[in-house]
Image (cartoon, rainbow, N blue to C red):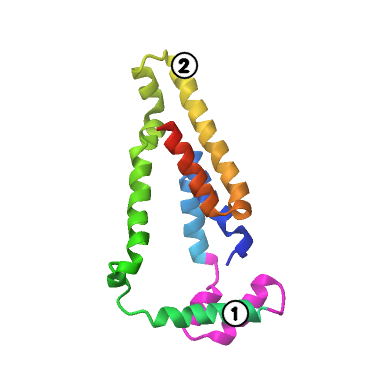
Amino acid sequence: MAPYRYRGALNIGFQLSITVGGAMVPALIITVGSLILPDTPNSMIERGQTEEAKAKLKRIRGVDDVDEEFRDLVAASDASKLVEHPWGNLLQRKYRPHLTMAILIPFFQQLTGINVIMFYAPVLFNTIGFEDDASLMSAVITGAVNVGATLVSIYGVDKWGRRFLFLEGGVQMLICQ
């Protein structure tokens, strides 16, 4: 239900919560939100409650002119109903690039070793020869850089786009490797 121009930042807000070590925060928000938030216009359209969905959309957006967005939601719902065998469709030739990227992106992210560095930073830095204080400070610096990069992404995702951030991050990873 978030306005389009803020969806990217809200999505990366989840990542920020994980980055600062507060995975419980988004989990709690999602749990409480699922109990108290009303149905989305999209889900109401899926269940055939079109008039209620349009009224809800007007209330959420705070304007009466929601016809264009409402038509888009109805069109998307109608198009989704026409899809047969969605899981089988993933193996079709036209979706292979998407499927390949969906598998390779997380694979290469793991290959960078960032999870090992983030989870075991003090032990890792101590093992490679840093003293106790220096290894702890290195872990703090690594975490601070991660938080800073996440904040830049929150600021820029809706301004520059996900594709730009993805490509720019890929270039940085390639250089660092």
Relative to residue 54, is residue 161 depicted above or below? Answer: above
Question: Residue beneath label 1, please?
Answer: 70
Say if residue 18 shows up in the picture.
yes
Residue 58 appears left or right of 139: right
The reply to whether the magenta stretch includes residue 168 is: no
Three-letter code for the amino acid on which mark 2 is drawn: Ala
Say if residue 22 shows up in the picture.
no
Q: Quadrant of the C terminus?
A: top left
Three-letter code for the amino acid on which mark 1 is drawn: Phe
Q: Secondary structure at mark 2?
A: helix
- Of the pair 68 and 161, the residue shown nearer to us: 161
Q: Secondary structure at mark 1?
A: helix
Please report the bounds of the magenta region as a residue range: 36-65
Give how far across and how far down residue 128 sits, in percent.
35, 18
Crowding around mark 2 (Cα neighbors within 10 Å: few <14, some 14 to 19, many 20+) is some
Q: Pick whichever of labels 2 and 1 is earlier in the sequence.
A: 1
| Label 2 close to label 1 by CB (< 8 Å) | no
Residue 120 appears left or right of 25: left
Residue 58: give its label: none
